[in-house]
Image (spheres, rainbow, N blue to C red):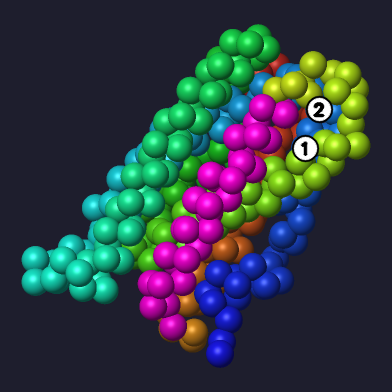
Amino acid sequence: MSASLTAHLTSLSTSRPYAAATQHPFLKAAGTGTLPLPLLSLYLSQDRIYAAHAYPRFLGQLLARVPFASDDAPNSPQERLHQSLVAVLSDALVNVRREVGLFGEVEETYGLRFAQWAERKATRDYTAEMARVGALGSLEDGFVFLWAMERVYLDAWSHVKSLLPDVSSGAGDSALPAVRQLVENWTNPEFVQFVDTLGDLVDKLSIAPGSSAFKRAEGIWARVVELEEAFWPVEDEITVPPESQ
């Protein structure tokens, strides 16, 4: 029996190593209590752009592509699949709205002042690729992209979580309490289940090995790894005036 599509994608050697996106220096600093608070502010300001603007638009584009057909019986395999796709997209929208609220709470609690930061090129690149796939890609392309984003994110913050036990509660700077709050959001059982459900649905989309959709999926996976790596900011970015970013 051949491996599932998602298992195949995660086994690939991509042009940028997977660890570059999931064990980035930003993540190591977050997990070891050495992340500067301004760098966390920069990162969250960009993630808010992604979550509040680009992600909901992308979900809407995918929802519009679900191929409902009136001649599909209510209990037919196709209708059940389509309803499952709608359900996970609905969950994704609820999740991201809650996440945007969390960003606001973290910003206020730690005085992060997101407005001081301009949109980074990496953020523009990521949201532009989401828009391109949403507008021009197939439903299958879109779901592969959605799952890939969430899978990389889960693995990245799981890496941070794996480092935290080695850090005492008082270690590092004031970013650590915020990091712990973010880790809880992005590694809790509900989020893990959401990512697993997305993966199961991707594997049910009948993307056959060797097909054009299969080859596009490989390209999408590699591109998301690149985008995720670039999305993590580096410390040099907070040493220049925000308007120069």
Residue corresponding to mark 2: 35
**Secondary-structure class at tag 1:** helix
Q: Residue 134: x, y in percent?
A: 36, 53
Q: Residue 162: x, y in percent?
A: 80, 45
Q: Is residue 187 magenta?
A: yes
The residue segment tinted magenta is 179-208
Q: Residue 239: x, y in percent?
A: 79, 21
Return the mark for residue 10: none
Q: Residue 67: x, y in percent?
A: 21, 64
The answer to whether mark 2 and mark 1 are in CB contact below 8 A is yes
Q: Is residue 146 magenta?
A: no
If the image is split into quadrants, where does the N terminus sit? bottom right
Q: Residue at x 39, y 44 (%)?
A: 91
Residue corresponding to mark 1: 26
Q: Picture quarter containing residue 75?
A: bottom left
Using the image, determine if residue 40 lies above or below residue 128.
above
- State the residue lying farthest toward the left: 71
Nearer the observer, 243 or 141: 141
Q: Residue at x 14, y 71 (%)?
A: 72
Which secondary structure dominates the residues rendered in magenta?
helix
First in sequence: mark 2 or mark 1?
A: 1
Nearer the observer, 179 or 46: 179
Kind of residue indicated by mark 2:
Leu
Q: Residue at x 75, y 61 (%)?
A: 17
Kind of residue indicated by mark 1:
Phe
- State the residue lying farthest toward the bottom: 1
Q: Please tell me how many numbered marks the rendered image carries.
A: 2
